[in-house]
Amino acid sequence: MTNFLKEPFKTKLKWYFAQDIIQLNNNADNGESVIIPSLRQCWNHNYQVILSYDDSAASEYEELWPQCEYWWANTSDPKHVISYLEERETEGRPGQFFATGLNLTEDAKYVLSHLCQSLQSMTLSSYSLLLNWVKQQRPGPGTSCVNIICADFVGAFSNEFTQLVIGLNQTLLEQT
């Protein structure tokens, strides 16, 4: 990011998200590690937004977290997405925020063999399988626990995805 863009970018982020931003408490310069707040701490302070930015300029701003690792299978096959995420879970979670992606990805072969289908129809036809995976997840700091779950078309099916994620958050709050 050029110096010219840094200040307007920072100003807009602060303006859009104001007090909702979870600021990075980075004491790495003092030899201490980054303090990652718990969900309860975020909710107690009304923090709702994590800004993760994949650029070295992020380290200059307490509002920007470093790049958030994103577990994404890059496939149109929902079964492969789930097996990929389960494999990553067995490897253990990274040391900071990370996201699990239930996103399906169309490749050229898929597009050419499904000319009348959209990304939305492809995703929604697999939603029950993807939502079943969400139902089986455990939130929390454990090595095989999920942190952030991302999906496309989350408003589908009466917001079932959103309700499941809120339920995971409630479970986590009850545990703390």
Image (spheres, rainbow, N blue to C red):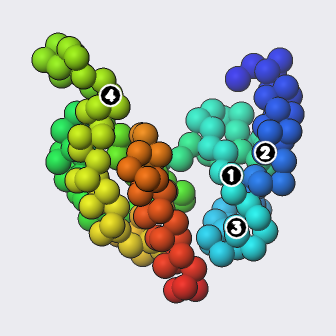
Q: Label 1 amino acid?
A: Val
Q: Residue furthest bottom?
A: 175
Mark 1 or 2, nearer chain start: 2
Q: Which residue is mark 4?
A: 119
Circles 4 and 2: CB distance less than 8 Å?
no
Q: Dot 3 surroundings within 10 Å: few (below 14), some, or many (20 or more)?
A: some
Q: Is residue 93 left or right of residue 48?
A: left
Labels 1 and 4: the sequence-earlier one: 1
Instruction: Locate residue 116 relative to residue 97 in the image: left or right.
Output: left
Q: CA distance from mark 4 to mark 3?
A: 33 Å
Q: Secondary structure at mark 3?
A: helix
Q: Are marks 4 and 3 in contact (CB under 8 Å)?
A: no
How far is disc 1 from disc 2 in space, using C-alphas?
7 Å
Tell us which disc is closer to us: 1 or 4. 4
Distance from Cα at disc 3 to Cα at disc 2? 14 Å
Mark 1 near mark 2, Cβ–Cβ under 8 Å? yes
Instruction: Tell me what residue is drawn at x 66 percent, y 75 percent.
Output: 40
Residue 33 image offset from top left, x and y in percent: 65, 65
Q: Amino acid at mark 2?
A: Phe
Please tell me which residue is depicted at 32% across the width and 28% down the height of the picture: 119
Residue designated by label 1: 49
In which quarter of the view is residue 31 placed? bottom right
- Tell me which numbered mark, 3 or 2, is placed earlier along the sequence: 2
In this figure, what is the number of numbered marks? 4
